[in-house]
Amino acid sequence: IIDAGANIVAPPMWMLVDQEDGEIVASNYTEYVKNKGFDIITWTLERSGLLQSGGGWYFQTTNGDNDNSNSSLVVSDGFVFEFLHALQTEVGILGIFSDWPATTTFYANCMGLGLLEADEPEDDSGVASFTSGLLFTF
C-alpha cells in the first residue's frame, strides 16, 4: 500500500489510544501501523458533545466502554485537551478532524504547533509532503 503512494491511515481516535495504569498510551494498532511506515490522521474530535457523560463511542478506549479499558479516564470536558495531547505526543498524529475548530486551534497555539508548509516535491510527481509538526484539519 505504501509503495502505491497511500502512506497515511485515518482511523477513529479511539483506535489509536488505550489506557495503562491510569494514563493514555498509544494502542497496539498505532504501534503496528507506525512500524509499517504509515502516518496517521484521525477523526472526529468533539463529535460526542459534553464529556461529562464519558464521550460515548469516540472515547471508548478511555471511558470504560471498551473491553480493553478498565476504568474511565474521562471525568470532565477538559479531558478533550488531555486526549488531544496524547494523540499528538503518544501517537504522533499528523492531524485531526474536528467539528469545532476552537479546541484544536487553542491547543495548537498553546503548544506552538500551527499549520505546516509543504515541502517542495523532490521529483516531477507534484506530490508534496510534510516533514514535521502537526497539521490540523477542520
Image (cartoon, rainbow, N blue to C red):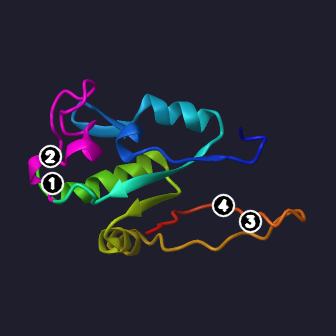
Which of pointers 3 and 4 indicates the residue nearer the eye?
3
Is label 1 in contact with label 2 (beta carbons under 8 Å)? yes
Residues rendered magenta in the picture: 50-73
Is label 3 in contact with label 2 (beta carbons under 8 Å)? no
Q: How crowded is mark 4: few (under 14 residues within 10 Å), some or many (20 or more)?
A: few
Residue 49 image offset from top left, x and y in percent: 19, 59
Query: Residue 51 has which mark?
Result: 1
Q: How crowded is mark 2: few (under 14 residues within 10 Å), some or many (20 or more)?
A: many
Distance of mark 1 from mark 4, alpha carbons? Answer: 33 Å
Residue in view at x 39 percent, y 75 percent: 109
Q: Is mark 2 on a helix, strand or loop?
A: loop
**Along the polypeptide, which appears first: circle 2 or circle 4?**
2
Q: What element carries label 4?
A: loop
Residue 40 image offset from top left, x and y in percent: 53, 48
Residue in view at x 77 percent, y 63 percent: 127
Distance of mark 3 from mark 4, alpha carbons? Answer: 10 Å
Question: Mark 4 belongs to which amino acid?
Answer: Thr
Query: Residue 131 has which mark?
Result: 4
**Along the polypeptide, which appears first: circle 1 or circle 4?**
1
**Along the polypeptide, which appears first: circle 3 or circle 1?**
1
Q: Quadrant of the N terminus?
A: top right
Instruction: Residue under label 3, please give it.
Output: 128
Distance of mark 3 from mark 2, alpha carbons? Answer: 39 Å
Residue in view at x 74 percent, y 65 percent: 128
